[in-house]
Amino acid sequence: MLFELVAAITLALGIGGLAYGLRRISGGRLPKTVIPVAAALALVAFAIWGDYSWASRTASALPARVVVVDELGESNVWRPWSYLFPVTERLVALDEGSVRPEANDSGLVRADLYFIERRQAARKSTISVDCASPRSPAGETAADGRLIQAICDKAASSAGTQND
């Protein structure tokens, strides 16, 4: 967060300085207000860029065996454009290297999930999935289906390579 603050201030000062230079070159034909307006627009643009690029930057920094299975978007009053284009604030990632069958041979498959939220520490959770007879519990969402499918696909491909 400190890095973002320093980057935003540096950008605002740089764009404000550029606007000041343009005002000087124009011989004062540009109004004085162009300097703070340019700096403010730079801050807003930087904030929007940071909001919309966070998820892709975070996902690309994950290890190769950790894949994003869901992105959760949000809309806020202070970001009115987010009602048209929701901002991804949270990611759910599957550690494909952790997918393994339960030890008791119950047909369940265990996997580690990471819940990554912007400006928060990532949380890890281990879940069990019944890939042999998938159920559709009440309240299941499309994201749950993608998650279960990703775990079961990885378990099947791991079992296939072990049998070869």
Image (cartoon, helix red, strand yellow):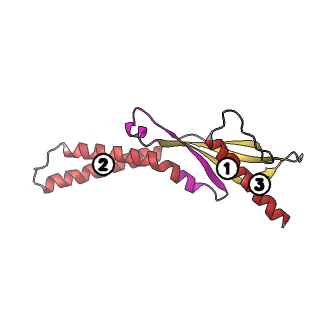
Residue located at (85% from left, 64% from top): 163
Q: Which of 59 and 106 is in front in this view?
A: 106
Identify residue for label 3. Answer: 155
Residue 21 picture location, percent across and down:
20, 54
Can residue 63 be seen? yes
Q: Is residue 115 above or below residue 76?
A: below
Q: Is mark 3 on a helix, strand or loop?
A: helix
Q: Which amino acid does label 3 sit on?
A: Ala
| Badge 1 amino acid | Leu
- Residue at (25%, 51%) from the top-left corner? 17
Magenta part of the protein: which range? 57-83
Sequence order check, earlier mark of 1 and 2? 2
* Disc with the residue nearer the chain's start (2 vs 3): 2
Q: Image point 10% across, 50% down: which residue?
A: 29
Q: Is residue 9 left or right of residue 115?
A: left
Residue 73 on the magenta segment? yes
Query: Which residue is more in the foreground, 62 or 103?
Result: 103
The residue singled out by tag 1 in the image is: 94
According to the image, label 2 marks what residue? 13
Please provide percent x and percent y for residue 46: 38, 48
